[in-house]
Amino acid sequence: MLAFLTATGGAILRDILVNNVPEVLHTGFYGSIAILVATAIYILDEFNYASSIHLLIVGISGILLRLFAYHYRWRLPKS
């Protein structure tokens, strides 16, 4: 949950400082990636696999997923 709050909070603060509507509120993919990474870390911890290398792999995977989402302009579905 903390990962979600810091990811979305930083993005919202950035957009507010440049006087834009926060991207997280209408098209952002930040929150979803943060929740996926936080869930993966939680599962690793529950099964006692939370070693440095596993956490590094999860972190790099989250960064790569965000870069792919940005590059290919992935968006959340609109309701």
Image (cartoon, rainbow, N blue to C red):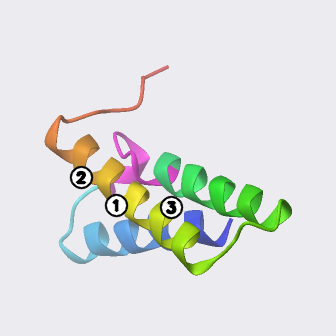
Quadrant housing residue 54: bottom right
- Count neighbours of disc 2 (C-alpha within 10 A) and say few if under 14, some if 14 to 19, many if 20 or more: few
- Count neighbours of disc 1 (C-alpha within 10 A) and say few if under 14, some if 14 to 19, many if 20 or more: some
Q: Secondary structure at mark 3?
A: helix
The CA span between labels 3 and 1 is: 9 Å
Across and down, in percent, residue 67 comes to 24, 52
Q: Which residues are magenta?
A: 22-31
Quadrant housing residue 52: bottom right
Q: Please give the name of the residue rendered at 69% of the width and 71% of the height, measured from the top-left corner.
A: 50
The reply to whether callout 3 and callout 1 are in contact (CB within 8 Å) is no
| Residue receiving disc 3 | 58
Which numbered marker is on residue 26?
A: none
56 and 25: which is toward the camera: 56
- Between tags 2 and 3, which lies in front? 3
Query: Is 61 in the magenta?
Result: no
Across and down, in percent, residue 74 comes to 28, 33
Quadrant housing residue 41: bottom right
- Amino acid type at circle 1 is Ile
Q: Please give the name of the residue rendered at 52% of the width and 73% of the height, measured from the top-left corner.
A: 53
Across and down, in percent, residue 31 comes to 50, 52
The reply to whether callout 2 and callout 3 are in contact (CB within 8 Å) is no
The reply to whether callout 2 and callout 1 are in contact (CB within 8 Å) is yes
Quadrant the N terminus occupies: bottom right
Which numbered marker is on residue 63?
A: 1
| Residue receiving disc 2 | 67
Which of pointers 2 and 3 lies earlier in the amino acid sequence?
3
Q: Please give the name of the residue rendered at 75% of the width and 55% of the height, measured from the top-left corner.
A: 43
